[in-house]
Every structure is written in structure tokens, then in C-alpha cells.
Amino acid sequence: PTGTEDDYFMAVIAADQKIEPRDWMPEKYRKNLIRQIAQHAHSEIIGMQPEGNWISRAPTLKRKAILLAKVQDEAGHGLYLYAAAETLGVDRAELSDMLIDGRQKYSSIFNYPTLTWADVGAIGWLVDGAAIVNQVPLCRASYGPYARAMIRVCKEESFHQRQGYEILHVLSHGTPEQKAMAQDAVDRWWYPSLAMFGPPEGESPNTAQSMAWKVKRFTNDELRQRFVDMCVGQAEILDLTLPDPGLVWNEAEGRHDYTQPDYDELFRVIKGNGPCNRERITHRKAAHEGGQWVRDAAEAYAKKKAKVSA
Ligand code: ACO
């Protein structure tokens, strides 16, 4: 880069303006964005599986229609994000290959099983709730296509969070068995949801640079704290207990103290050794291979059209 290019790039960031695909950008900025946006896109696509597991068993037609819409939204989020990544010069097919062969990551949270219908509620409330806390600041990320994709994603995530909350509210005000099922789901999803925010300060190698470039606006710990503070009041209204005896209001600090998730478990899951990692990737690979004929047909059709118009 010339001094001028780099100065201009940093001036755009300092002024809180957006970097657009045609602007000059440092190679490390481009690579870091591809890494984060691709991981984010993969998470949306893999995230369809745990809930998709309940589409055929949703308790009513209305619940089924809502869940179908939600899972389709996740596919849409994946597509906007792949499109945003493509503006940085990578190909979506290449990103899909990197997901399938394990060269790129996806969120740890989707490697946990959905054992009961209440898990669909807990995912909506906690997992989508955590996603909103993480993603609202990304609407102000310095890279224009990513920030703009996040605006629509966050609106849809709000609906997802509400639908999960409502499922849990109905269950927790239902029969004792339903309430116990809701509590069990919250007990299992709480710590994995906290871990979703990523490793703590000191073990998060990307944070400092990402914040300097204004891709990330807050540290993983700051967002995790915000999420805990948000959930406490909501759990009270749900009449469910967050499974942490160490969760108490800290008057002096103006926030809750809480027990950290097990970060060794997070690293194990990220490395591929969570309860459902293999199942998720096997399923994705089969779906990808099963869709090959659609991609072939689309390509053949595009070629035919190009020939006709030439
Ligand atoms: N699951 C899987 N991998 C993770 C997780 C997690 N929960 N948290 C951190 N990691 C990985 C990072 O990708 C990074 O690995 P890499 O350098 O090989 O890419 C490593 O652990 C160290 O973490 P950080 O240095 O903290 O990484 P980063 O600054 O990227 O922060 C975070 C991680 C917060 C997830 C960030 O990438 C982000 O905000 N991403 C966008 C949101 C997102 O991906 N959400 C997905 C789930 S939400 C949903 O889809 C509904």
C-alpha cells in the first residue's frame, strides 16, 4: 500500500464511515472479514439443523408454520452473508467446501442436541437472544455490505427471539411436566449460550485488531455481560431459573456477577469434539451433494440462455 491509501483507509474508519468493496483495504482486514463473515454464514446454515429436527414434530400446525418460517429465515441469513463475503473476492462454492472439510468454523452452539420441544423455545430465547446482542453492534461494522446485511438479520432475529420466549412462557405456565421440560431446556442451553460469545479477554486473539478496525465494537466479555443482565428479568417473567447459583446483582458495579462458562468445553467443541459436530457436518455434506443436480441444472440453463442472447 502507499502511505496515502492506508491513511485514507484509517481516516474512513476513524470517521465512522463505511469501507465499500471497491475501496482499497489492507489485506489483513479483508482476510479477517472473510473469516468472520464466512463463519457467521456457516453458523446460519448449520443452525438450521437443530431446529429443523423439530419441524415434523411441532405440537400444532401453527407452531409448525412458525418454525418453518424461522428455519427458512436462517437460510436467508446465510445467503446474505455469503453474498457479503463474495464482495471481498471469495467464491461461495469455495466457502462451502471449507465448511465441509473443516477449514472454516461455525458457531459452537449448533453442536448441541435438541432433545425436546422446549429446546426450540430455549434456542429462540437464549441462542437467538445472544445472537441479537452480538449482532446489533455489527450493524455498525466498518465494512458496508456486512453492516447492511446485519440490519435485516437483526430484525428477523428479534422475531425468532420472541417466538422462543413465547414457547417457553406457554410451557412454564402449563402443566408441571411442561414447566419441568422448559426448565430442563434452559438448564442445558444457558452455559453453551454464554460460551457462544467466544473466549474471554486474553484468550481472544482477534478482538484487539477487530476493534481497532471497528468490525467488532465490544469485547466478547462485554457482550456476554450485557446478555446476562438482559436475561435475568426475562427469566423472572418466564418463572424459570437460570442455572447459576453465583448469579447475583452487584450493586457497586451496576451489573450481575455470574459464573463463567467452561471455556475448555468451548475449545473442545470448536475443535470438532462437541456432542453433534460430526452429525452436523455429515448432514451438511449430504445436503450439499444431494443438491449438486440443482447447481448443474442452473449452470446448464444459464449457459443455454447466454447462447440464445449472444
Ligand atoms: N464458536 C466457534 N468458534 C468460535 C466461537 C464460537 N462460539 N467463539 C470464538 N470462536 C473462534 C473464533 O472464530 C476464532 O477462531 P479463528 O481465529 O480460527 O477464526 C477463535 O475462536 C478465537 O476467538 P476470537 O479471537 O474471540 O474471535 P472473534 O474476534 O472472531 O470473535 C465472535 C468471535 C464473537 C463469534 C465473532 O467472530 C463474531 O461476532 N462473529 C459474528 C457473529 C457470529 O458468527 N455468530 C454466529 C452464531 S449466531 C447465529 O448464527 C444465530
Image (spheres, rainbow, N blue to C red):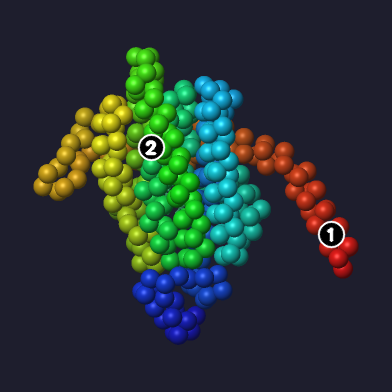
| Res. 228 in view | yes
Q: How far apart are marks 1 and 2 (CA)?
A: 47 Å
The residue lying furthest to the front in this view is 62
Disc 2 within 8 angstroms of ligand 1 (CB) = no
Query: Which disc is residue 295 wearing?
Result: none
Name which of mark 1 and mark 2 comes first in the sequence: 2
Residue 177 drawn above or below residue 86: above
| Res. 52 in view | no
Disc 2 residue type (three-letter): Leu
Residue count near mark 2 (Cα–Cα under 10 Å), binned few <14, some 14–19, many ≥20? many
At x 46%, y 56%, the residue is 151
Apparent side of residue 304 relative to residue 112 in the rendered image (left or right):
right
Apparent side of residue 31 relative to residue 302 in the rendered image (left or right):
left
Which residue occupies the foreground of this view, 193 or 172?
172
Q: Mark 2 points at which residue?
A: 126
Label 1's element? helix
At x 60%, y 61%, the residue is 86
Q: Name the residue under label 1.
A: 305
Residue count near mark 1 (Cα–Cα under 10 Å), binned few <14, some 14–19, many ≥20? few
Which residue occupies the foreground of this view, 10 or 163?
163
Asked where in the image residue 305 lies, by quadrant, the reply is: bottom right
